[in-house]
Image (spheres, rainbow, N blue to C red):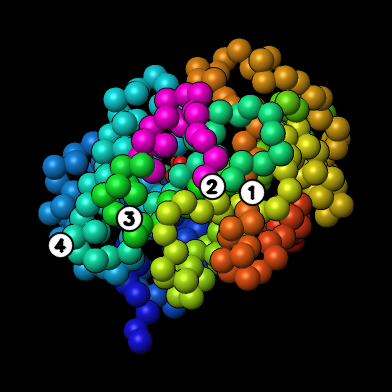
Amino acid sequence: MPAPRILILGATGGLGRALNRHLAPDHETVLWGRAELDFERPEAIAAQLKAQPFDVLLNVAGMTSPDVCEMQPEKARMANVIGPQVLAEYCHALGARLIHFSTDYVFSGEPRDVWKEDDETNPVNVYGRTKREGELAVLQASPNALVARVSWLFGPDKPSHPDHIIQRALQTDDLAAVADKVSVPTSTVNICDWIERIIHEHPETSGVLHLCNTGSASWHSWAETALEVAAGLGLPVKTTHVKPIKLADLTQLKAPRPLMTVMCNERLQNRLGIEIRHWREALEEHLVEKHRQK
Ligand SMILES: NC(=O)c1ccc[n+]([C@@H]2O[C@H](COP(=O)([O-])OP(=O)(O)OC[C@H]3O[C@@H](n4cnc5c(N)ncnc54)[C@H](OP(=O)(O)O)[C@@H]3O)[C@@H](O)[C@H]2O)c1
């Protein structure tokens, strides 16, 4: 059977670039950024999709900054609810597979062990609310669609928190990070592997699925772990110590953030029949790969 033709929406973003790098060698991938399809023009979407044959649509496009969403709620709704809903309607009518990406920020952040797929959502900001509405709109329009929730991404295609903290530690030992907010740092390299397996080995997977590494971290412990790995690799970081601060100290944030959004990945482990590695191991691999030439 020929490999499915995969259309990636949001291809200019971090996860979009990662998916293309992983899938392009063995698949026919088509990359669309906002220039090719803009969720703020929903009336044009069906005709644009009609002109491009595909079997699987990976939607990693969306308005992803909580602060921008808070300031532009109408645009956030177009990008995170209306656009994905139109995609789902089109895919359902066509019989194409839709994998739509969502976030741990659909949860309230109240204290608990972990959040499971069917736990009640209760987002605290516009980003989380529009992403949750988008999940529901997608699944209503296309019950066979998969909603893949991810959290705290890192990987080679877009610098994120651990890369930024290492860059800063090369300049100064005056570092601070929030210690009272936790989630699961997750490798985009791992996500790409899981998505490829789902497409090929478990195409019937639908509903909501948490795609995250194992374990949990705060922005603070994630930062200190990254610095310890960097120091171990011989990077001249000025410290591996980061001052712990509270989320409430970040008074410049426009959107409230949920404090505890660690997702459970048991359903993913059972579905794929694999043991998913700890985020620390994945982070170490990322940093070794990134810095080994330097
Ligand atoms: N990064 C994380 O830590 C994280 C955590 C939890 C969940 N997620 C979810 O994972 C997915 C991918 O995230 P990411 O980090 O790869 O995002 P990203 O780097 O911010 O990329 C977002 C993509 O969406 C496109 N886009 C934005 N507004 C659009 C619009 N109105 N119409 C069409 N395209 C639009 C952007 O295009 P332009 O570049 O042209 O604006 C870009 O290609 C998202 O669903 C996000 O909610 C990410």
Q: Quarter holding the C terminus?
A: bottom right
Residue 2, percent from left and from top: 34, 84
Residue that carries the numbered disc 3 in the rendered image = 143
Q: Do the residues labelled 3 and 4 touch (CB within 8 Å)?
A: no
What is the distance, in whole Å, between disc 2 and disc 1 at their CAs? Answer: 8 Å
User: How far across and down, in percent of the image, does residue 27 sit?
Assistant: 39, 75
User: Disc 3 or 2, which lies upstream in sequence?
Assistant: 2
Tell me if residue 275 comes above or below residue 141 in the rendering: below
Q: Residue at x 50, y 20 (%)?
A: 255
Foreground residue among 119 and 51:
119
Residue reaching furthest bottom?
A: 1
Work out whether mark 4 precedes mark 2 in sequence or the reverse, and give the earlier one. 4
Residue 117 badge: 2
Q: In which quarter of the image is residue 130?
A: top left
What is the C-alpha distance between the residues marked 3 and 1? 22 Å
Under tag 2, what secondary structure? loop
Per the rendered image, the range of residues in magenta is 117-135
Say if 60 sits above or below 112 in the image: below
Q: Position of residue 250 (x, y in %)?
A: 64, 17
Q: In which quarter of the image is the N terminus?
A: bottom left
Q: Residue 51 carries which label?
A: 4
Distance Cα–Cα, label 3 vs label 2? 16 Å
Residue occupying image coordinates x 65% and y 32%: 260
Can residue 21 be seen here? no
Asked if disc 4 is less than 8 Å from ligand 1, the answer is no
**For residue 286, which numbered disc appears in the image?**
none
Residue 113 position within the rendered picture, expressed as x and y whole percent measured from the top left: 71, 39
Q: Is residue 129 inside the magenta stretch?
A: yes
Q: Is residue 95 visible?
A: yes
In the rendered structure, which disc, 2 or 1, sits on the residue that comes first in sequence?
A: 2
* Label 1 sits on residue: 264
